[in-house]
Image: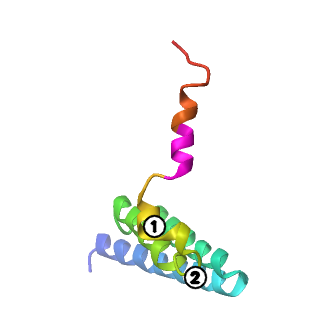
Amino acid sequence: MSEANERHAARWMAAAVALAAVIVASLTGISDPKLCRAAIVAGVVLVLWLSEVIPLYATTIVLWVGCVLLLSPTDPANFALPRVLSKTRSDRRLRDRRGSGCQFR
């Protein structure tokens, strides 16, 4: 195996170990189901972003899918697929505030 392939395999192995550690730590350390699932999604996405074992856009898709699959059973009103993929009220509030603040010219 070439040196580049060995580094690639080592990076995948390190990411797999980190992913397992995040999942085990969340499952054993957090008793609230919603918070535990949110920590798993956040930890997995963070490991994937930092390790760059998959492209960054794919990691964002993992974030969206993880929110829907893991968090929607605990709170369907806030984490259903249309809600995750649509603009939220906070986006609208931010857009509305832009016109009322200080404007630099």
Residue under the image location 43 percent in, 66 percent down = 64
Identify which residue, 43 or 72, lies in the foreground: 72
> For numbered disc 2, what is the local secondary structure?
helix
**Upstream in sequence: badge 2 or badge 1:** 2
Task: Determine which of the numbered discs, if any, sits on residue 96 in the image.
Answer: none
Residue under the image location 55 percent in, 16 percent down = 104
Q: Residue furthest front?
A: 77
Q: Name which quarter of the figure residue 102 lies in.
A: top right
Mark 2 packing: few (<14 Cα in 10 Å), some, or many (20+)?
some
Q: Is residue 37 left or right of residue 15?
A: right
Q: Is residue 32 left or right of residue 66?
A: right
Q: Is residue 44 left or right of residue 53?
A: right
Residue indicated by mark 2: 23
Q: Name which quarter of the figure residue 93 lies in.
A: top right
Residue 2 among magenta residues = no
Residue 72 image position (x, y, % from top left)? 51, 76
> For numbered disc 1, what is the local secondary structure?
helix
Residue 45 image position (x, y, % from top left)? 49, 67
Report how far apart the C-alphas of labels 2 and 1 lie in the structure: 15 Å
Residue under the image location 42 percent in, 69 percent down = 81
* Cβ–Cβ under 8 Å for marks 2 and 1: no
What amino acid type is highlighted by mark number 1? Leu
Task: Determine which of the numbered discs, if any, sits on residue 63 in the image.
Answer: 1
Residue 83 vs 97, above or below: the answer is below
Q: Tally the numbered discs.
A: 2
- Magenta extent: 88-94
Residue under the image location 64 percent in, 86 percent down = 27
Kindly report the secondary structure that dominates the magenta region of the rendered protein: helix
What amino acid type is highlighted by mark number 2? Ile
